[in-house]
Image (cartoon, rainbow, N blue to C red):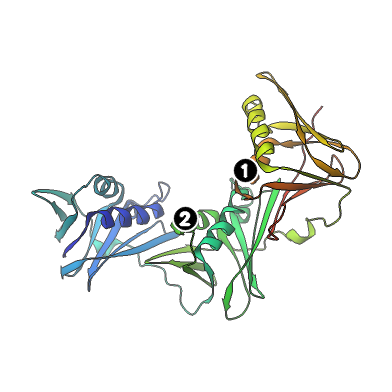
Amino acid sequence: MKAFCDGGDLAEAVGRAIRAISNKSGNPILDNIRIEASEGTLTFTATDNELTVTTGIVADVSDGGTALVPGKLFSDFTRRLTSERISLESAGSKMTLRYGDSESEFACASPDDYPDLPEVSDARSFAMEEGALKDLINKVAFSVRQDDVRPILKGVLLEVENGAVTAVALDGYRLAKCVKPARLAGDAMKAVVPARCMNEIARLLGDGEEEARVYVQPGRVRADIGHTSVVSVLYEGEFVAYRNIIRTSFDTLVTVSAQQLYDSLERALLLTRDDRSNPVRFDITERTMRITSASGRGNLDERLAVVTSGPDLTIAFNAKYFTELLRVCGADSVTIKLNSPADPCVVVPCGGGEDFLYLVLPVRVS
């Protein structure tokens, strides 16, 4: 293999691909990045057999071929190159990089030992603007479960039908749901996508109107974003019947500035961080929401101006769950919908008309 490419393009492509390499694979061959040179393109692939990232860049290819380079080392090295034009040449078990008047060599593994790459073909698909898909992912993926107690809850449910994508994530204590318009090709579809895959897709997406397309087939999903594709296995099994969890009627509604609430809860978190439940009490009256927390590190007592309808209420929550929501809600103010100190609340952004909600369970405090 012999090819020439831009140094910045090389570093960026390797940086995208290496996100698929996992420290938990247990297979040394998967610590490598596969580089293929053919017909004016360098293609970089990395996988851990669950997540696969493939990306390509324009290159002057004088001799096609495939090489397997050590992923982390190659990524760290290419990020430190400043030359505008890089030569890559592989022969046998080594690859040589030439840049300016310098060169470096890397020991390579045999490409024959690399696993076959997964294919997603004959799949149903939907398309969205990149900015919309990125926002959809960011608004729900943070709510997935982090442990393996219920593995399917480590994924994001995607339901695609009637010209819209509904994304849902929950961990047993909170739930996030967001709906965005989409262009559907074929029948309705449903899949539970690992949050790791969703987050990698979000990192690749821009904020504009360029189209990203997602393909779903039994057992696998693929997202095509520009010259990069992300392929992942899907979680199997039945997702939680989330519609049965979300209440539609509430006694007390509280509208508050999202930024003011976020700032207050961030201060509360500094004082409650020794307690895993990060308990913060909301005392809600007609015009004021009093936020209090107490711990061995100190106490907090703040009051926020609110607009309330319904009876007064005192309830407590994990402050972390609210701050994570407020980081992504994208609204100037939110409405908190409540029934009792023991019932879950629902939070929705004010204005804009977007179909986005967040449900969180209260905590018991003495």
Q: Position of residue 350 (x, y in %)?
A: 72, 52
Which image quarter: residue 63?
A: bottom left
- Left or right of residue 107, residue 145 in this image: right
Q: Is residue 29 something that shows in the picture?
A: no
Residue 362 visible, this orientation: yes
Which residue is disc 2 drawn over?
A: 200
Residue lying at the far right in this picture: please name it. 311
Q: Amino acid at mark 1?
A: Glu
Give, as a three-letter code, the residue at label 2: Glu
Q: Residue at x 23, y 54 (%)?
A: 7
Q: Nearer the viewer, residue 60 or 240?
A: 60
Residue density around tag 1, few if under 14, some if 14–19, many if 20 or more, within 10 Å: some
Q: The N terminus is located in which quarter?
A: bottom left
Residue 363, x across and y down, in percent: 77, 36
Quarter of the image for residue 310 reads top right
Which element type, helix, strand or loop, lies under badge 1? helix
Query: Quick check: 71 left or right of 267?
Result: left
The residue positioned 54% from the left and 69% from the top of the image is 128
Against 181, residue 297 (above or below) is: above
Q: Which residue is at a point 81% across and 34% down the rendered structure image? A: 288
* Residue 61: x %, y % from top left: 17, 68
**Looking at this view, is 90 or 303 the one in front?**
303
Counting labels gives 2
Q: Residues within 10 Å of mark 2 (few under 14, many from 20)?
A: some
* Cβ–Cβ under 8 Å for marks 2 and 1: no
Q: Secondary structure at mark 2?
A: helix
Please tell me whether residue 280 is drawn above or below residue 117 in the rendered image.
above
Question: Residue 80 at what x, y percent from top left?
Answer: 24, 44
Q: Nearer the viewer, residue 235 or 316?
A: 316
Report which residue position mark 1 lands on: 324
Q: Is residue 87 left or right of residue 296?
A: left
Q: Quadrant of the C terminus?
A: top right
